[in-house]
Amino acid sequence: MELRQMIYFKELSECLNLPAAARALYITPQALSKSMRVLAREFDTEIFYRDQGKLRLTTFGQALLSEVTVLLNQINAMEDRLKNIASQENNHLRVACSHGILQGHFNSVFNAFKAQHPEIEIEFLELPDVFAEQMVEQEDCDLGLSINLPNKPELFETTVLQHYQLCAVVHPDHPLARQTTTTLKQCSQYPLITKNRIFKIWQAVEQCALRQQLHLSYALSSPNEIAWKELVLSNQGVGIGTTYYRRDDQPDELPVIPFTEKELTWDICLIRRRDHYCSHSASLLIEALKQAQDPELR
């Protein structure tokens, strides 16, 4: 017995009128009658009979109706559960964000998106750069906003949204404070104050130093931004940072000197694992983030 036959049988059993049931099912009376004859042959017994011209259920037909009603109710309940699961999956996004990204421009981008699509729930996981990338790689997150190109670029679809050059951040009395640009070679004369190896800033600086065969010493290598700033304020070294957090209406009290090395970047990248299922909600968010891309990078 097919599901379609069960649906046909239940409709005819409830109205006991062949033309009316056929209209409700959007089929012809002939097609409905044929389907019921096939069903009766399958069980080798009559399901309906006529009494004074009116269609009636046989005793077997009544038993069949009871069983079919239970099955169809279970199927409908299953469909409702699956639709609910699908709705929750399609309307819930997990986004891995590197530390600090939500403190700047992209916070307003996400707020505007949520106002436009209140039905979509976004769960943010703010993590060190490397861990944010790993969450997307392991498919624990649908999308990621990470720093610089992924360490495994072949696994990801990557879009650079905004470009920032790394900068030296120094005390006003530091010798570098009077310069408009600097190089990593110049900064290597002083202790460096930067994030540690799970951040892309550290990776970019180390790779650049390796290419130039520079020896670097660190006064601090830590994600602790308070300690980072205190060391710079006490003139104990050169901080390595980015201008992403700077606001025109709140000038930083510390001089910020861009590096001339082009590879010393802090690029905000939208990443998605190539083989990860992209829901409609994810596609909408991707489009919104690409709309916020720096026009010079398009």
Image (cartoon, grey):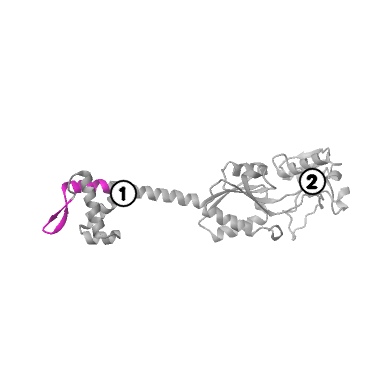
Amino acid bearing label 1: Leu
Q: Position of residue 219 (x, y in %)?
A: 80, 39
Tell which tag, 2 or 1, sits nearer the viewer. Answer: 1
Q: Secondary structure at mark 1?
A: helix
Q: In the depicted view, which residue is nearer to us: 84 or 225?
A: 84
Badge 2 amino acid: Gly
Residue 91 bears which disc, if any? none
Segment colored magenta: 48-68
Mark 1 residue crowding within 10 angstroms, few (<14) / some (14–19) / many (20+) = few
What residue sits right under mark 2 in the picture? Answer: 239
**Residue 259, horizontal then vertical, whole percent:** 81, 50
Q: Does the magenta portion include 36?
A: no
Residue 60 can be seen in this image: yes
First reached walking from the N terminus: tag 2 or tag 1: 1
Left or right: residue 85 versus residue 77 is right
Q: Position of residue 62 (x, y in %)?
A: 19, 48
Residue displayed at 25% across by 45% down: 67
Q: Position of residue 243 (x, y in %)?
A: 75, 53
Q: Nearer the viewer, residue 96 or 34?
A: 34
Which residue: 59% across, 60% down?
Answer: 112
In the image, 46 versus 78, the foreground residue is 46
Q: On the rendered image, what quadrant is the C terminus found in?
A: bottom right
Q: With 179 as the anchor, is 156 left or right in this view?
A: left
Furthest-left residue in view?
52
Disc 1 marks which residue? 3
Q: Is residue 191 left or right of residue 97?
A: right
